[in-house]
Image (spheres, rainbow, N blue to C red):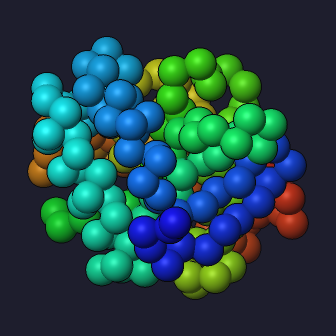
Amino acid sequence: MSLTNAPTLETEHLILRGPEPRDFEPLIAFLTDRTRAEGFGAYDTRHDAWRWVALSVGHWHIHGYGYFTIEDRATGRPAGITGIWNPDGWPEPELGWVVFDGYEGRGIAFEAAARAREWAYDTLGFTTLTSNIVPDNTRSVALAERLGAWFEREYTNVTMGRDMLYRHPGPDALGSDGSVEAYA
């Protein structure tokens, strides 16, 4: 049972879908793991993490977009989240991603984020997106750059403090497969 009006998007290895109640436990486990969730926004208690999950569901209803659950086609299990995030205080819509424990290093975040970006451009009509990355999150920086994004500036994130804003190439700079053809 989806809790939002999110569409279902597919890739070769993944299904991106709206959040469902069965996603709560894996997401709460991620959010309460201080080491893994440090660059995303970790929580000390299950209750605070649960509130973030509810916020994420509400984000879909307010904006008509948000974080998809990344479902691994092979197992049917949640592997992470990706999508467009723009809560109050954000400088502009952000393409974000997280993979859960055991799903790192398999290209899941890249495949999912590229598909979510394509949807944002083709369906929502966005002409640009950013990815907001805390300093020293070298894995997210590498993924943003692999997606064709470049460092634009630093800013103060209302919840995370100092953040780096990476700018994604617009839809005109992407090939039909989502790869970067040319960008400034």
Q: Is residue 90 visible?
A: no
Q: Where residue 43 appears, x then y in whole percent?
A: 18, 31
Q: Residue at x 22, y 40 (%)?
A: 49
Of 155 and 114, nearer the camera is 114
Q: Is residue 87 visible?
A: yes
Q: Residue at x 59, y 19 (%)?
A: 102
Q: Residue furthest top?
A: 35
Q: Is residue 121 above or below residue 112?
A: below
From the image, which quarter does the C terminus lie in?
Answer: bottom right
Q: Where residue 179 appears, x then y in whole percent?
A: 79, 53
Q: Where residue 178 appears, x then y in whole percent?
A: 78, 58
Q: Residue at x 37, y 20 (%)?
A: 36
Q: Is residue 102 left or right of residue 87?
A: right
Q: Residue at x 26, y 58 (%)?
A: 54
Q: Quadrant of residue 107?
A: top right
Q: Quadrant of residue 168?
A: bottom right
Q: Is residue 132 left or right of residue 156?
A: right
Of 75 and 138, nearer the camera is 75
Tell me how many marks there are: 0
Q: Where residue 63 appears, x then y in whole percent?
A: 36, 79
Q: Is residue 125 left or right of residue 106?
A: left
Of 39 and 127, nearer the camera is 39
Q: Quadrant of residue 11?
A: bottom right
